[in-house]
Image (cartoon, rainbow, N blue to C red):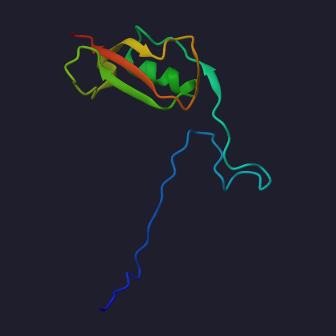
Amino acid sequence: MQLKSLAGVALTAVVLAPAGAALASDADPGAPVATAAASKRLPNVVGMNHQAAQDKLQSHGFYALRERDCTGRGRALVWDRNWKVQRQSPRAGKRVSTNRTITLCSVKYTD
């Protein structure tokens, strides 16, 4: 049986991090590589434009965002500015990890 080698094949990894976050290569050599996520109070975004709500949550350090069509029709929120937040989960005011996924349930302004 003959084995062929894959010479010249390169793999590239892309690391996405929030703006201002230090990567392991930027960190102090004596500092631990991984740190625990912060726990913050979740802002109220119910009633806001969906895009503005996402911007507000991200400005508070919440980047794991999920979106849903609140009508139950399963539509994709293609243009966030056409939607308004009806519910959020977890509830506003609750103290949660910034790594926790926040779900925004929205409806179109025309609904």
The structure residue drawn at horizontal position 48% and vertical position 59%, both measured from the top left corner, is 13
Task: Identify the image quadrant of residue 81.
Answer: top left
Residue shown at the point (73%, 49%) measured from the top left: 32
Residue at figure coordinates x 65%, y 29% from the top left: 38
| Residue nearest the viewer, comparing 96 with 14 | 96
Which residue reaches farthest front? 1
- Picture layout, residue 27 above or below residue 40: below
Above or below 25: residue 109: above
Residue farthest right in this picture = 30
Residue shown at the point (50%, 11%) measured from the top left: 44
Compared across the picture, whether 34 is left or right of 90 comes to right
In the displayed structure image, the side of residue 53 where residue 82 appears, left or right? left
- View extreme (bottom): residue: 1
Q: Is residue 23 left or right of residue 9?
A: right
Residue 31, given in percent of the width and then of the height, sits at 77, 49
Residue 51: x, y in percent?
40, 22
The number of discs equals: 0
Q: Quadrant of the N terminus?
A: bottom left
The quadrant the C terminus occupies is top left
